[in-house]
Amino acid sequence: MCLPLFVPGNRPERFAKAAAAGSGMVILDLEDAVAGPAKAAARDAVLHEADMLAGAQVLVRINGAGTPWHDADVAAVAGLHRAGLLLAKAEDPDRLRALADGLGPGRATWALIETARGMANARHLALAADRIVFGSVDFCADLGMAHRRDILLPFRAELVLAARLAGRAAPLDGVTTALDDPRQVSDDAAHARALGFGGKLLVHPRQIEPARAGFRPSESEVEAARRILRQAGAGGALAVDGEMVDEPVLIRARELVAQWEELA
């Protein structure tokens, strides 16, 4: 379960606090969180501060290909020693591969899918990137859609399928924009978990615990999973609590227990 926390790249005084907030990963943002006139200063701040952050994995969200800031952003991230890269509005798998080659081994390259073209190329992007991420708010703006679960369901399912077909880690879901509604954050995270997502983007430290709670299986789910595993023994088809249990059910039970122990 992965819960990266966004930090505006032009707010270097927040970088260390974000890294210590407990999400395990921070994304220093050079794109939407930074207005055009401030992008150069934000880039310099990231270049000078990112390698010194401790306590969290670091990614840098760079501006999309074709924007005036893209090449300078790429050069800045290449100049860092350990930070990975999150490409905004990813659409071209060949561009992602070129970015990965430029960074070299051990540096993550993630694709943020937030346009119609990006969604159409999701399966190719999943093969080119280390991980794909859903930028659901921008995606809805690009298509003129309302940002609602029922509308976004097929697109979220497509990203989970794309990641699985590519043999990559489960994708990450987009942000919850509500800053003062932990229940909504938790509910959105639980919805993402049910669909097969492996985490969620966060925009404020106080979203960390509600999101973690949403990705945590319930006690009743875990107890049922443990009961299935206890009674299953060596495997094979059997009945537990009046329901048929075979290997796919056992796989899910093991996953639930593993998730519970990870988040305990």
Image: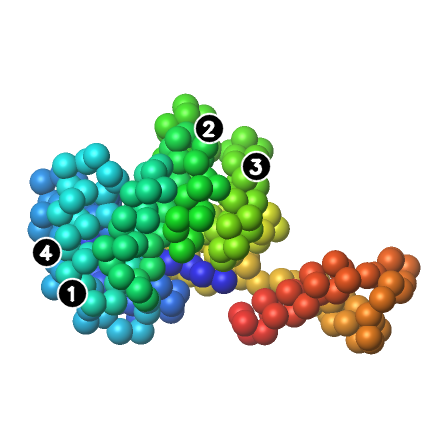
Secondary structure category for the residue under label 1: helix
* In the image: residue 24, left or right of residue 123: left
Gap in Å between the C-alphas at discs 1 and 4? 9 Å
User: Which of the marked residues, 3 or 4, is nearer the chain's N terminus?
Assistant: 4
Report the amino acid beneath label 2: Ala
Q: Which mark is residue 44?
A: 4
* Percent x, y of residue 70: 18, 43
User: Considering only order in the chain, which callout, 3 or 1, is on the residue closer to the N terminus?
Assistant: 1
262 versus 2 height, above or below = below
In terms of image quadrants, where is residue 46? bottom left
Above-or-below relation of 146 to 112? above
Among the 4 quarters of the image, the one containing residue 232: bottom right
Which residue position is annotated with label 1?
Answer: 49
State how far apart marks 4 and 2 are (Cα): 36 Å
Q: Is residue 181 visible?
A: no
Query: Gap between marks 3 and 4, in whole Å?
Result: 39 Å
Q: Which residue is mark 2?
A: 146
Q: Amino acid at mark 1?
A: Glu
Q: Nearer the viewer, residue 226 or 64?
A: 64
- Lower position in the chain sequence, tag 4 or tag 2: 4
Sequence-wise, which precedes: disc 1 or disc 4? 4
Residue with the mark numbered 3: 153
User: Which quadrant of the rendered structure holds the C terminus?
Assistant: bottom right
Q: Is residue 143 visible?
A: yes
Mark in front: 4 vs 2: 4
Q: Mark 2 against mark 1, which lies toward the viewer?
A: 1
Front-most of residues 173 and 171: 171
Q: Is residue 125 above or below residue 20?
A: above
Q: Is residue 155 left or right of residue 116?
A: right
First reached walking from the N terminus: tag 2 or tag 1: 1
